[in-house]
Image: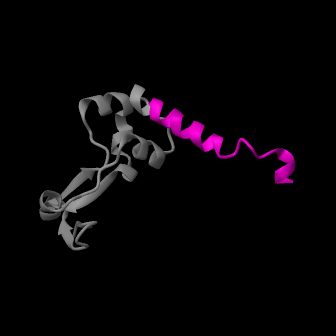
Amino acid sequence: MNEILCEVCKKHFNVSKIQRHHLFSQSKLNRRLYGKLIDDPKNIKFLCDDCHLNKPIPKFTEIQFCDALGIVPRSKTGRAIYDRLMASEFMLYEDITIEDLS
């Protein structure tokens, strides 16, 4: 029997009663920027109809999506935020010298 577990209510359902919820939206722009990466298992939760329609399901921002997949953001805004985050992370370590690490 083909059954899948709903990731919210933890009940088993027939495959026909399960919906794939994309954590990062599969809008036209996101599809154009990320293609098949939108359908990566790290971006999908399997939910029953009730949970998909009635429960607050978390969504990914572009930064969270790219972090989960280990890729660099492809939109201008996402890349700017990513660059700022990387610069601030680098700033945490700028006062440390190689001698300090030895």
98 and 47: which is toward the camera: 98
Image x and y of residue 73, in percent? 45, 34
Residue 45 highlighted magenta (yes or no): no
Q: Is 21 on the left-hand or right-hand side of 97?
A: left
61 and 94: which is toward the camera: 94
Q: Is 50 on the left-hand or right-hand side of 8?
A: left
Q: Is 39 on the left-hand or right-hand side of 98?
A: left
- Residue drawn 31% across and 33% down? 30
Q: In which quarter of the image is the C terminus?
A: bottom right
The answer to whether residue 102 is above or below residue 77 is below
Q: In which quarter of the image is residue 13?
A: bottom left
19 and 2: which is toward the camera: 19
Residue 73 visible in the picture: no
**Number of on-image labels:** 0
- Residue drawn 46% across and 35% down? 81
- Residue drawn 40% across and 52% down? 42
Instruction: Tell me where the magenta segment starts and ends, as one range.
Output: 79-102
Q: Quadrant of the N terminus?
A: bottom left
Residue 47 visible in the picture: yes
